[in-house]
Amino acid sequence: MCTTSGFWPRDAATRLVLARHLLHGTPAPERDDDGFVAACRAVAGLPNPSPSPAQVAAQARFGFGPRGAAEPLVSILICTFNRAHWLKEAIASAAAQDWPCEIVVVDDGSSDDTDTVLATTPGVLTLRHAENRGKPAALELGMSVCRGDAVLVLDDDDKLLPGAVRALATALFADETLAAVFGDTLVFDDADGAVLDWKPASRLPRELTRRAVLTTIPAMPGATLVRMSAQLDLAPFEPTLVRGQDMDHYLRLSALGPMAAVPLPIQLYRRHDGLRGAAQARWKKHQDPAEHRRRFLGYVQPVFRERWQADVHGRDEGFAWALGLAERDLPGLAQQELARWPFPDSPHEAWVRSRLGLTTHPARADEPGWLVLDDGDEGALHALLHALAPTGPVEVVVGQLRESLGSAQLFWPGDYRMETVLRPRGRVLRLASSASPEWRSPPVEGTWLPALPPSQVATALSAVAGWPPPVRSRAVRGDALLPITRRCIQMRSPDTATALAATADVLERMPQWIPARALAAATCRRAGLTREAEVLAG
């Protein structure tokens, strides 16, 4: 199971169309070439009449095929405080799962109707604090009685999609090296139930788990399934973190093993301005973002500083720690961390120093720079840049801009730009394509680049230059080869007439494209057109 795939709708508008289809029954997106819509419908508990082979494969990939003989128990832990009006919905969503689950609810000293809700809800193991002690203490109490082989912590104001646990558990129990798996979150408005957003979990390769959580939370806790053996190896939840315990939990968990994404919607996150935090210090998260950040940092800064000071890490994690410290408004400590690591820097390290306002030395550039042709697949871009581990400059060219490019740049700095048609470059470079992650070009002059959409360049250039063709291992919806790209392939046809006709079309479109002119000259010689060959070669 490839959990780091960018298997999800590419643009925000399509994501919202699909989310509204899943939750409200509105029309589904028209295309489902790779079975993603079918997999989402399986999670949402919706039927898939007459599925195509791709849709059947997509459902089976995430555990919605034939049931396994043994399905380990999963614990769903809900900590609640004065949210009786939402708690019943959270419990109902947990009870609707089609995987063996136990539901544990910790009432953290509620004074509303929570007792009544729990007393009239069968099949729930209930524990209670006599007075409000905060979420960390409630989590510790709940964990002490959970019996599952994995645990999911669901907030009392959120809900799970019907097949959420099956999607997560199938991935987690299929790979014993994983400490946790997580999925995407759909955000809905508490006032009217309208779907507001689709928040994707991190699509970073699992090897970057540790570095990633130092700078950002990879997913929502309610969309995360943690292996119980890993959870038991952790120290207790930090009692001072009445806010930010999620950040600290992911940070500590990442030290025990990798985590991976199941790129499907798992959790329904309720957007509201209800009070948050401990009983003694509650505030409205969405009412004043600046005040929310000030209070949040007041809790997390001391703990994050303590974790950093106690951690034994190498150079790669050191630069990630520096970014994390800076993100939490601790720039002095970030600079102190970077001072530990001598020059020369990799390009990423130089970028981190410059981002923190420090003097940088020239980055190492041992090889020609990489030109990464991105086809819009989120996870594929992250995975490809990670696999390249580039030491020289990186340029990523996309057909359309999207939010996730900022996330990619956090780990692989470079020049990210949009070009509808690729333009020539003035340097030697190597090409890589996110649609065909195993394909690499030899070093080429930038003038060899064809004036085609970025997603077509690798195929067209390989055909004309005689390189091994890129083989797409990612489903690329709505991006079939253009007619001009097919003509590039036909330029090498053994049938001379076909090759000449294709050559004429390609040169009419791109008369100065150097490799096309060279191939055209060879084709003309093969056809006995000596004079035309000389003109093209000249």
Image (cartoon, rainbow, N blue to C red):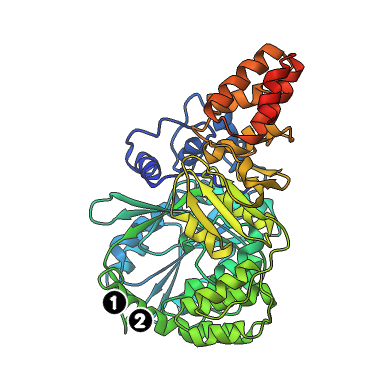
Q: Position of residue 215 (x, y in %)?
A: 52, 71
The residue labelled by disc 1 is: 283
Q: Is residue 165 above or below residue 147?
A: above
Regarding mark 1 in the picture, which secondary structure is present there? strand
Residue at left offset 58%, top offset 50%: 381
Quarter of the image containing the C terminus? top right
State the separation of the CA atoms marked 1 and 2: 9 Å
Q: Is residue 42 above or below residue 307?
A: above
Mark 2 crowd level (few <14, some 14–19, many ≥20, 10 Å Cα): some
Labelled pair 1, 2 in contact (Cβ < 8 Å): yes
Residue situated furthest left in the rendering: 191
Image mark for residue 295: 2
Q: Position of residue 289 (x, y in %)?
A: 30, 72
The answer to whether residue 227 is left or right of residue 188 is right
Residue at left offset 38%, top offset 59%: 158
Q: Amino acid at mark 1?
A: Trp
